[in-house]
Image (cartoon, rainbow, N blue to C red):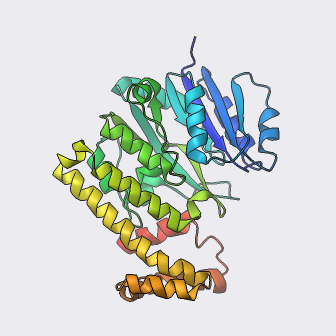
Amino acid sequence: MNPKVSVIIPAYNTEAYIAKAIESALEQTLTDIEVIMVDDGSSDKTVEVAKSFTDQRLKVIVNQQNRGVSAARNRALRAAQGEWIAVLDSDDWYAPERLEKLVLLAEETNADMIADDLYLIKDGTTSPWSTLIQESGEHIDKILQIDILYFVETDVYGQVGLHLGLSKPIFKREFLVKHGIEYDETIRITEDFWLDMKCLINGARFFLVPKPYYFYRSRPNSIVRQSILSRLNQCCIATNYFIQQEVVKTNPALMRALSYNLAVFKKNLAYFQVVVPIKQGKWVTALTEMRKNPDFVSDFISRFNNILERRIQYYVMGNKSVFDMSYNLQRKRKTNN
């Protein structure tokens, strides 16, 4: 008999965190589960730590080469047998009752996907500093059905909002299989957002539970803080793809929302195409990109106060978390209140 839930964990060089992630899955109050960890070519002891567990519900799959988080998740998806698919990043963890609570609510609401709020916790600390909903400015106190327009409008790059692309829904596997939905392996960052978009564009019933059962760790070397140009390029390509879909073309409000997101991505991409080479000392490249972007100077001036604040916090005040998600969320919320 197939398990109720398949927990899929992609992992890459997270030997310091993987045990906690696996333990949190295996110690769920819902015991009818399987846990599939796919190691994506780690060079540390991630695999060794994972294989030290003796629980027969845990399966460890090893990629000999690093293929990216989306490819690792797809490999786990293809191996999964559960009625529901739950994603867990290898440096995060679940509250013990998470899966039991979400599966029960998913069945009550006839959901195809259901997410909870996220506890936001800095690496090295023991207590969350906030939650995703608290930082969003949204007031949600009961289970809320999320439509695709709301999902897009509240998840704009660099702006305060709900940012449900960071959430970790559980998915009805039957729905994913029926619509042939997998992660886009050309996308290595923000892959959750685009998988959710695929589900919503195929008519998924998506619900948000305003209680946090997922602990989302913010750490300095995580992939979300790396490769800003690659991330923005991938987001531009993915947004363009969805804009071409017939369901978007026939929905003017959704077309406007996605077009706005695309404009924001392009504006930030143009800005960082100048800034990144400057930081790397590639002055000719920076000047070339600056000539392509006549709005760079005004854009830089508009960002100057925030740039200066971060530098003072980091170099003068010794605030080493100034470039982490936690600091940026707090700053954006303060700016928008």
- Looking at the rendering, which quadrant does residue 281 occupy? bottom right
Q: Nearer the viewer, residue 50 or 195?
A: 195
| Residue drawn at 52 percent across, 45 percent down | 185
Q: Quadrant of the C terminus?
A: bottom left
Q: From the viewer's perspective, is residue 40 above or below residue 280? A: above
| Residue drawn at 45 percent across, 63 percent down | 233
Q: Is residue 266 left or right of residue 189?
A: left
Q: Is residue 143 visible?
A: no
Q: Quadrant of the N terminus?
A: top right
Q: Where is residue 277? Give x, y as percent.
A: 56, 80
Q: From the viewer's perspective, is residue 85 above or below residue 264? A: above
- Looking at the rendering, which quadrant does residue 159 occupy? bottom left
- Looking at the rendering, which quadrant does residue 325 occupy? bottom right
Q: Where is residue 75? Give x, y as percent.
A: 60, 34
Q: Is residue 99 visible?
A: yes
Q: As drawn, which residue projects farthest toward the top?
A: 1
Q: Where is residue 184? Give x, y as percent.
A: 48, 44
Q: Where is residue 30? Give x, y as percent.
A: 58, 24
| Residue drawn at 56 percent across, 84 percent down | 278
Q: From the viewer's perspective, is residue 300 above or below residue 252? A: below
